[in-house]
Amino acid sequence: MNRHILQSGFRKIYPLYFGIVLATIALILIGICGKAGAAMLPPSGAGSDWFIDMNRFALSAHAALKCDDCHGSMIVNGLQHSDEKRPDFLRQSATRTYDYARCRRCHELSFKRYLEGGHAKALREEKDPSKEKKQVTGGKIMAPTCGECHASHYERSGLSRVAVGQRMLGACASCHPANAASYRNNIHGRVGIDLGNPKAAFCTDCHGAHTVDSLKKPQTALLACKRCHPKAETEFTGIVIHASLESVSAADAPKRAEVLWIHRIRWFALAVLALSLAFFVAHSFLWLLREIHEKLRKH
Amino acid sequence: MQATSFTPDTPIRFSVIHRLLHLVVMFGFTGLAVTGLSLGLSSTTPARGFMWLIGGASHAAMLHRYCAVVTYGCVVIHALWFLYYKFGLAGAWTGPDSIVPSLKDLKDFKHHLAYFFGLEKTPPRFDKFSYMEKIEYWALFIGMNTMGITGLVLWYPECFTRYIPGFFVNLAQTLHFYEAVLAVVVKFFIHIGMAHFRPETYPADTSIFTGRSHKK
């Protein structure tokens, strides 16, 4: 009777095991179908308008401030608000006309870091008439100041790390869509944005909130890596986080070569996958047809 | 199921160690598949739901590594058993009972294809292991090792980047994902489908669990 023990045990786990298998298959199928629909980003919190929703403002981090704490005399570009003689006043971009130097009064450290950082550097270059940089942006000022990333009237305080990270991705993506997309495909983006793990690294955890360094120098990048990977050494920074050609600058030839290799290996793996599956599926299908035919013939 | 038709002289197809390893790998592999695919398809709602169910990405990572150690442990035990079989029991590498591919497999394959298309009246008489089982065995053996190596690189990137370029970690990640998709589809659809759900064997081929062969 001993030999029946495993047999009867198997009878019990058989439905369970195939239940798991079927559930997995269903998971994969629903997953593939739902992938496009579920891949929506939370809305970006950035940007301001001339019109303020006071209900939302009352919930924001700045709710305790009075209008004139930030807007003072309501004089912008030498014009008094509201100027009845200039009705096109409201057609200007609110975030482009506001003097964000006023933020400095409360946010001294952030402001100092911003001035030292990549965005401020880009702004100086765009405003410098001697530079050819203007050709890139068509003469428009593109580099962000405070208001491009922070919605000063509506941004709430006390959000969780994950919620801040998700909103941050939306803000960064409005100018860096390729980098946001490649980050989302990376392990950090998957674990942080998709699965909501607060231990994951969000944009500013590596690039710095106001310094916004592009981390092109390995030594600078290593400092960022080491915050979570203390055992990392210089070559660790060679791991490509933004692994798409669109998110690597055209001047960075070695990195582009690496990304190209990642693409080639992906195509190779995909070809092996497709060929193997074609063989297995075709072989199994023919086998099944023949066996079903034999079975029916004998009836 | 043909379970009740055992007699003491029913030939034994799989010994205890192989049955046990198959049982452990069955659960280890399923664990690896569900946790790994949940990360691979992390932007989808079911993957997020499953991740939430098992306690988030950190727990999934822990479970995935636990299952990986258990599953790869089975590969190591199997390899050790193979050495014992060869040197301890002085078993043969080749022959009708061997898992090593031979010329007969090629003939069987041609014969089997001819049988599919009705050019042969009967299926080929396979040796102990058919060409299909041999393909699956060796694909799994190679797959387990590449998954093990790439997985180890992804587990300890700090250590590996001391010896290999950083973007090799990206390559390991790419290979790990596509190999995983291949393994999951082949095991869950082809292997289970063709080993158990084929009209000949439906509803299950129990020999991997009981060890007893139910054919000649």
Image (spheres, coloured by chain):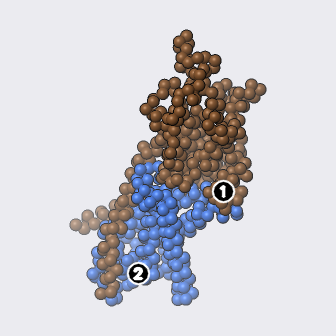
Which residue: 68% across, 47% down? Answer: A215
Residue B160 tag number: none
Which of the image's four quarters has the C terminus of chain B?
bottom left
Indicate whether A297 appears above or below B98.
above
> Is there any visible trace of residue B15 in the rendered image?
yes
- Which residue is pictured at 59% across the width and 61% down the height? B154
Colour-to-chain, blue: B
Measuring 56% from the left and 67% from the top, which residue is drawn there?
B148
Closer-to-camera residue (B119/B168): B168
State the brown chain.
A
Q: Position of residue A147 (x, y in %)?
A: 58, 32
Instruction: Give the foreground label among 2 and 1.
Output: 1
Image side of residue A78 versus residue B141, left or right: right
Identify the residue at image location x=41%, y=54%: B49
- CA gap, disc 2 and disc 1: 53 Å
Q: Is residue B22 above or below residue B10?
A: above
Residue A178 at x, y = what percent?
58, 41
Of all residues, the one furthest to the right in this rendering is A130
Question: Are the residues tagged 2 and 1 within 8 Å (C-beta)?
Answer: no
Q: Is residue A227 left or right of residue B14?
A: right
Q: Amino acid at mark 1?
A: Lys
Q: Secondary structure at mark 2?
A: loop
To which quarter of the image does residue B124 belong? bottom left
Identify the residue position indicated by label 1 in the image: A226
**Residue A40 on image: x %, y %:** 46, 42
The answer to which image quadrant residue B203 occupies is bottom left
**Amino acid at pointer 2:** Arg
The chain holding disc 1 is A
Give the residue number, with chain letter if any, for mark 2.
B13
